[in-house]
Amino acid sequence: MTARPALALLGALLVLAGSFACSTAEAAPRRIVIVRHGEKHTPLTLCSIGRERAQALAAQYLSPTSPMSLLRADPPAAILAMTLHTVETARPIARAWDMRLIAPPIGYVPIRNNRYFNAKLNTVNQRVARDLLTNPRWQGKTVLMVWEHFHIASAALEAEFAGEPITLRQLFHLDKVRGVAGGVPMTWPDSNYNFFWILTYDRPEDTVPSRFEVVRQYFAEPFANLPSNDWNAPEPLPPGSGCT
């Protein structure tokens, strides 16, 4: 799979996002599965644990065949990524499904934690979220998002860009989901790579998910050694993992 077809497909998606948002009623997917990228080594690459987590996700929780899979009975209509680390994590998953990975051009650039770069990622987040909630092509389907945690949920990032919805928590109106004890977290912790957020929409016209589910990753052999720390707890990393 080459980058060029995937980029072309994303470009088509973003064009559709602009046109459908203005011309159609809401048409939400049935389910959106969100997972953070694996543990990282540098702005360019994942560390050994992150690479193993990517393989484990493809073999178990996000596999087309594993009994553990969250997707086996409900294949994804698309696999989306947004940054270099998310692209590296998503590639084994896309290969397992023999699907094209969709990522924007900025997804192939080393990530920088500054206002200029974050503003570009904000734009990607806004366009993708708008497309998912308004484009009829996703209605009744499942979409997998392998994402960067600041742009899933970050109180600090929201404060930096106050007055503008820029995280998935804002863009998917997760603060309005009912029945979540304590509410949907305002921040995805830096230390957590081992959770899924799953959004379910009972009706295509819904803009607020009907259900919000958190799934913790407990891998089976041969990946049972992967860390699975509590939410907002330190991640136990083995010596020599190269993870930062």
Image (tube, rainbow, N blue to C red):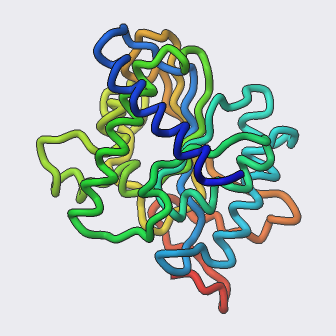
Instruction: Determine whether 241 is above or below 144 in the image.
Output: below
* Residue 52 shows in the view: yes
Question: Could you tell me residue 224's position as x and y percent?
Answer: 80, 65
Front position in the image: 155 or 216: 155
Front position in the image: 2 or 29: 2
Instruction: Determine whether 89 is above or below 62 in the image.
Output: below
Question: Could you tell me residue 240's position as x and y percent?
Answer: 66, 91
Could you tell me which residue is drawn at 37 percent across and 41 percent down? 168
Q: Is residue 17 left or right of residue 33?
A: left
Question: Could you tell me residue 236's position as x and y percent?
Answer: 60, 77
Instruction: Determine whether 240 is above or below 201 in the image.
Output: below
Figure label count: 0
Instruction: Tell which residue pokes out farthest to the bottom in this image.
Output: 240
Instruction: Tell which residue pokes out farthest to the left in this image.
Output: 163
Q: Is residue 62 left or right of residue 158?
A: right
Snapshot quadrant of residue 66: top right
Front position in the image: 18 or 97: 18
* Residue 182 shows in the view: no
Q: Is residue 136 left or right of residue 160?
A: right
Could you tell me which residue is drawn at 43 percent across and 67 percent down? 190
Could you tell me which residue is drawn at 32 percent across and 10 percent down? 23
Front position in the image: 192 or 204: 204
